[in-house]
Image (cartoon, grey):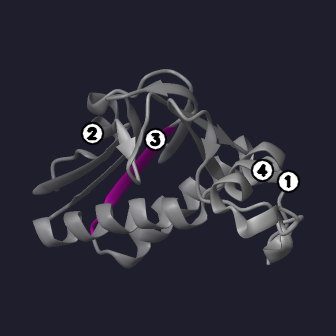
Amino acid sequence: MSRADLRSAPLSVDEVLAKVRHPGAGAVALFLGTVRDQNDGHAVTELEYEAYGPMALAEMERIARETEEVIAGARCAIVHRTGALQVGDIAVACAASAPHRAEAFAACRRLIDEVKAHVPIWKREHGPDGPVWVGWEDARCGDQHGSEVQGGDEELRSARQEDHGVHPTERQRS
């Protein structure tokens, strides 16, 4: 049974739950990450998710397997969307079952925390201010980027970084 999936089609909560339900499961925990209408005080009208598919699937499968190994009796599933999502859409679903609620909650929490930390999926927010990649900086420029702007105008410097930013898959990792 596959523990992980990556898809552009809408997610089915029932499908994710079916992957973890079984007669020995006394508890099932479900986490749904949904698209909200704001982030850091900025309006959000749409999110785009891009992934390095083969690696994202392998990482999600590893995370689910390792969670099942470290939390006794856990059965886990992870499904993540790619493509354009609207406010209210489900972006990621993590489900975990276990004989007892404490283990189901712990497994589900571990799943989403590990997905956020290790899976190569990138998010681009769209809103009235234009699109912005979330959680990355232009690795080509470092602290010197925008230093040629007279008067140190922070807003102009920020706009220049967005205009000249590289896609997150092309950035250098430290």
CA–CA distance in space, label 1 to label 3? 25 Å
Q: Is residue 31 magenta?
A: no
Q: Residue 160, labelled with which disc?
A: 4
Mark nearer the N terminus (2 vs 1) = 2
Q: Nearer the viewer, mark 2 or mark 4?
A: 4
What percent of the width, then of the height, locates residue 154? 65, 62
Mark nearer the N terminus (2 vs 4) = 2
CA–CA distance in space, label 1 to label 4? 18 Å
Amino acid tagged 3:
Val
Q: Residue 142, labelled with which disc?
A: none
Q: Circle 1 is placed at which residue position?
A: 170
Front-most of residues 5 and 173: 173
Q: Is residue 2 visible?
A: no
x 36%, y 28%: residue: 87
Mark nearer the N terminus (4 vs 3) = 3
Which SS class for mark 2?
Answer: helix
Q: Residue 17, labelled with which disc?
A: 2
Which secondary structure class fits the magenta region best? strand
Amino acid tagged 1:
Glu
CA–CA distance in space, label 4 to label 3? 35 Å
CA–CA distance in space, label 2 to label 1? 35 Å
Q: How many marks?
A: 4
Q: Circle 3 is placed at which residue position?
A: 79
Say whether residue 7 is left or right of residue 162: left
Which SS class for mark 1?
Answer: helix
Q: Nearer the viewer, mark 4 or mark 3?
A: 4
Q: Which segment did they paint magenta?
A: 73-80
Q: Is residue 78 magenta?
A: yes
